[in-house]
Amino acid sequence: MSEIRTLALACRDAAQTMFTLDSETKRKLLHDMAAALEAKCDSILAANARDLQQAAAKGVQGAMLDRLRLDAARVTGIADAVREIASLPDPVGLVTRQEIRPNGLKVERVRIPLGVIAMIYEARPNVTADAAALCLMAGNAVILRGGSEALHSNVAIASALQEVLEQHDVPAAALTLIEDLRRETMIELLQLSDIVDLAIPRGGEGLIRFVAEHARVPVIKHYKGVCHLYVDASADEALALNLLVDGKTSRPGVCNALETLLVHRDIAASFLPRAARVLEERGVELRGCERSRALVPGMRAAGDDDYAAEFLDLILAVRVIDDLGAAIGHIQRFGSDHTEVIVTRDDANAQRFVQAIRSAVVMVNASSRFSDGGELGLGAEIGISTTRLHAYGPMGAEALTVERFVVRGEGQVRHPQSKV
């Protein structure tokens, strides 16, 4: 038996223990995990320093390096996210629907854990704690496979959490960290369809496509976040400008950052030059259509590749469009079903936008940066689904459970003639 299969089987056995834990036990477990992260902050930061040093030596920079970096404040933030997950309603055992059938059967739909979840991610050591906390709160066991660039950080975080599991008489295998990072090992993990119930890749488009192409287990996919801000003719320009600056510049390397600005032709002449000045002051490079460049002469020309791009950088594609329908058409062509924003004072236009756009998150007069599990009340997110399986959009603990039927009867049989 291979090592990865042995680890996965141990994780599956541990999932049986997780399934039996009540809400208060799980909450206490997570609170103790949060405390352990803070208590071991120095060792976690020392491990992270090794990862940063090795990453810098390999030429890693920009958004990737930022995602990898931890400091005391970020470790505290990770611990706080675990505590917030512990404070959320426990989805396990939730009765979502109940009815009494004409024959007297009481039929309930009840949420239960998925089982074993494989989490595959890149340079985000915070995901180690977030994913573990969300999976455990939902009664699951988790197999974590991080990237090589964050190995030391992930080991330090996972070790702290595993110690807490053992203190609560839960097998440490309920949180299994894979340290063998060869691709062959990941492929083997993704093909354990008799053990792993769901795979969630979190990272760049290349990683997610690799997982989807090699997996024999169900996969939650989120290829990229090409997020749009559409400024309608009736928009409050000051409000639109604030949403644009926040969505593009607050953290450009994340998936809910804006990548394209669409501006109605009736407001473009007043809004675009003003927006360009503010964005350029913040180091944003603009790439636009002919009408955009006529209003902002220094803007570079944009092509279809720019409108389809997830830049993850201080680069913004711009287009002046004729009307709301044209904005919707652009998003339908170039969007990635992640997050779209309309800025408008016209309620009818807002509703038309919401109904026409099928993306996982649609915002009206709010920043795209709120497209995040923590901001939307999930505590933390294990990922964002842009595929329409059992979950769509930011995924919290409830998305890591599934409904089953519980039927209560008093001896009913389907065929009366079968009675003895």
Image: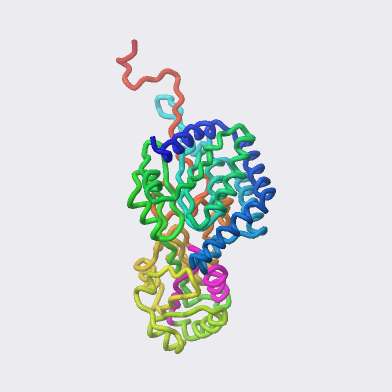
Quadrant containing the N terminus is: top left
Give the residue at x 44% y 36%.
6
Quadrant containing the C terminus is: top left
Using the rendered image of the protein, determine whether residue 44 is visible from the camera's viewpoint.
yes
Instruction: Judge left or right: residue 317 versus residue 93.
Output: left
Q: Position of residue 9 (x, y in %)?
A: 44, 34
Relative depth, front residue between 228 and 287: 287
Relative depth, front residue between 214 and 373: 214
Give the residue at x 50% y 72%.
344
Q: Check residue 250 for magenta coloring.
A: yes
Q: Position of residue 131 (x, y in %)?
A: 53, 48
Using the rendered image of the protein, determine whether residue 364 is visible from the camera's viewpoint.
no
Establish if 382 lies above or below 296. Answer: above
Establish if 198 lies above or below 123. Answer: above
Instruction: Judge left or right: residue 135 versus residue 415.
Output: right
Establish if 80 lies above or below 105. Answer: below
- The way the protein has been coloured in the rendering is rainbow
Q: Check residue 13 for magenta coloring.
A: no
